Amino acid sequence: MPLDGAITNKSGDKSMFTRRFFCGCLAGLGALAAAPAMAQTAAECATVTRDRQQRMKPDEVLSLLRAGNERLLTGKTFNCDRIAQVKSTAQGQAPIAAILGCIDSRVVPEIIFDQDIGDIFCARVAGNFANVDNLGSLEFATKAAGAHAIVVLGHNHCGAIKAAVDKVKAGNMTAMLKNFEPAMKAAGKVSGPYNSKNDELVQKVAEANVRLQVQNLPKRSKIIKDLVAAGEVKIAGAMHDVTTGKVTWL
């Protein structure tokens, strides 16, 4: 059963592909054909080279991430040879973006943005805030390794945010949760109780946290500030919906 159509590759170009996949099974007097599987071209599955990375612009990178999330939502994610990508990146890497994300198991940047091995850096910590360690990691990702975009990726129903509004005190979490106090103040007033059962409150704090991280990255890092000023890097904030997979850009 043939499938002909256009798909968008990682360079933003559209290419035609034709794929035929047959799965015959006897049913009564005849054979039934199964649905076709996705296939990608070599260009779509090619890992990013240093030359290509250096030629890319921040807006192009963000567009590729948006397109990747759209592929996820429409069930058209790329199906590439991961072992081939492991081999092609073994001697070096040239990721196009860095993600400051949450450790939540449902919020996996490579899957959410349909990116492959060698495509993005991921700095993950509960509640996606920038401390000195992941701030330095983002400096490395951009200044040293050449990524052109930083995305602060929050999500709804965030456990770290819920713990912060509930004022949880337990071990090292006590100090970690203090990082969300500025976002709790910035969220403003909401109706209902001030606890983790108030979905509106949790969402507003999570979004406020993303916005504050976006604002503060260039304030806290001269390296990132200079890259942004030079037009070499863009910082964007986004929220991932764990119930749908959709990324909304703030």
Image (cartoon, rainbow, N blue to C red):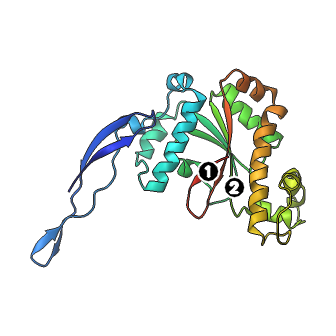
Amino acid type assigned to the residue bearing label 1 in the image: Thr
Residue drawn at the location 71% of the way across and 31% of the way down? 140
Amino acid type assigned to the residue bearing label 2 in the image: Ile
Can you identify the residue that label 1 sits on?
Answer: 248
Which mark is in front, 2 or 1? 1
Q: Is residue 96 above or below residue 4?
A: above
Q: Is residue 238 above or below residue 192?
A: above
> As drawn, is 173 to the left or to the right of 80?
right
Q: Where residue 100 appears, x then y in whole percent?
A: 70, 44
Q: Where residue 126 appears, x then y in whole percent?
A: 75, 55
Determine which quarter of the picture holds residue 7.
top left
Q: Is residue 94 above or below residue 100?
A: above
Residue drawn at the location 77% of the way across and 27% of the way down? 225
Q: Where residue 228 appears, x then y in whole percent?
A: 71, 27
Residue drawn at the location 66% of the way across and 52% of the way down? 239
Q: Please name whichever residue, 23 or 89, is drawn nearer the observer in this view of the structure.
A: 23
Q: Where residue 223 appears, x then y in whole percent?
A: 77, 26
Give the alpha-carbon distance from disc 2 to disc 1, as whole Å.
Answer: 19 Å
Residue found farthest to the bottom: 28
Can you identify the residue that label 2 sits on?
Answer: 103
The answer to whether the residue labelled 2 contacts the one labelled 1, judged by CB atoms less than 8 Å apart, is no
> As drawn, is 23 to the left or to the right of 250?
left
